[in-house]
Image (cartoon, helix red, strand yellow):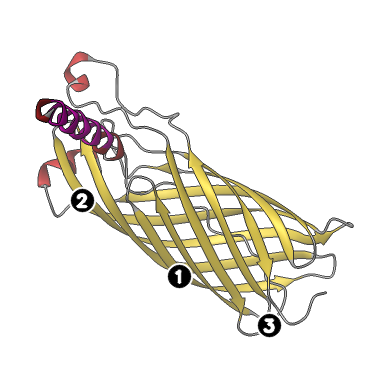
Amino acid sequence: MPQTNTNEIVVMKKILFITALLLLNGCAAYYPQMVDIPLIKEKGDIRVDAGAFFSPKIDDTTPENEEKKTVKSDPVSNLGIHGTFTAGITNVLAFQAYLCADAHFRAHIQSALGLYKRFENGTVTEVYGGIGYGGGFAQMMSVSSRDNYVLTFTQINVGKTDVGKNHFDYGLGLKGGYIFTHTPDSSSVDIYKKDGWIVEPSVFLRFGSSRIKFCAKVNYMWTNSVVERYYYYPVSISLGVNFRLGKKIK
C-alpha cells in the first residue's frame, strides 16, 4: 500500500511537471491586445468592456534547418481575459485603461489619453496615445527567463455606433508603437528578440441594446521586435460584453 501511494505521487509530479512545461512554452510576452474601440460620443460617456480571447498557434518564425531546430520551441495556443475602461472627461478628451492576463501567466496593462470627435452622420473618430507595460515567463528549450517590456503607442479608431434597431457598433482601429524588451533573468535569451516596432490593425462588431452589447474583435500584429528563432502570436480573437454607463444616451 505505501508503494502504491509512492507511485501515485510520482505520477502526479510528472503530470504537474509536464503541465508546467506546456504553460511555460516559449513565445513572446507581447501579443495583439484586445483593447476596446469605445467610440466615445460626449463628455460623461463611459464604456466598460470585458471578455475572453484566444490566440491560435498559427505562426512559426523558426527557419526549417537543422542548426536552428536545436533551439526551436513549440508553443501552445493562448487563452486569456481582458478588460477596458474608457470615459469622456471633456467634450474632446477621453481617458482609457486596459488590463489583460493569460493562461501562460503573462499580463499586460496600459493607459492612454485620447481626442475624439463625433460627426453629424454618426461617425466617431478617436486618436489615443499612451504607454503599456507587461511581462511573463518564456522558455526556449532549456533556457527560461522572465520577459518584461514597455510599449509606447498611438492608436487611431473610426466607426459608427447605434446603427439600426439592434444598435450595431462597428469600426476599425490601427495601433502603432515601439516596444522596449528586457530579460533580467538571462541575457542569453536576448538572441531571440529585440526592441522594435509593432503595427496592430483591428476590427470589431457590437450589437444589443443601447446600454449592453455583445462584442466580437479580431486583432493582428506585425512586429520586427522578434528575430527568426522566436515564436509569437500574430492574431487574437475576442468575444465579450460591452457596457455603456454614461448619463445620457443619444
Q: Look at mark 1 in the image and give the residue it sits on.
A: 111
In the image, residue 69 above or below residue 83: above
Q: Is residue 17 within the magenta segment?
A: yes
The residue to which callout 2 is attached is 146
In the picture provided, is 218 more to the left or to the right than 134?
A: right
Residue lying farthest to the top in this orientation: 66
| Residue drawn at x 16%, y 31% as measured from the top left | 5
Q: Main secondary structure of the magenta part?
A: helix
User: Percent x, y for residue 165?
Assistant: 89, 57
Name the amino acid, label 3. Lys
Spatial CA distance of label 3 from label 2 is 41 Å
Check disc 1: other Cα within 10 Å, few if <14, some if 14-19, many if 20+: some
Quarter of the image for residue 225 reads top left
Q: At 77% across and 80% down in the image, what residue appears?
A: 248
Q: Position of residue 88 (x, y in %)?
A: 63, 78
Q: Earlier in the sequence, mark 2 or mark 1?
A: 1
Q: Which picture quadrant has residue 249?
A: bottom right
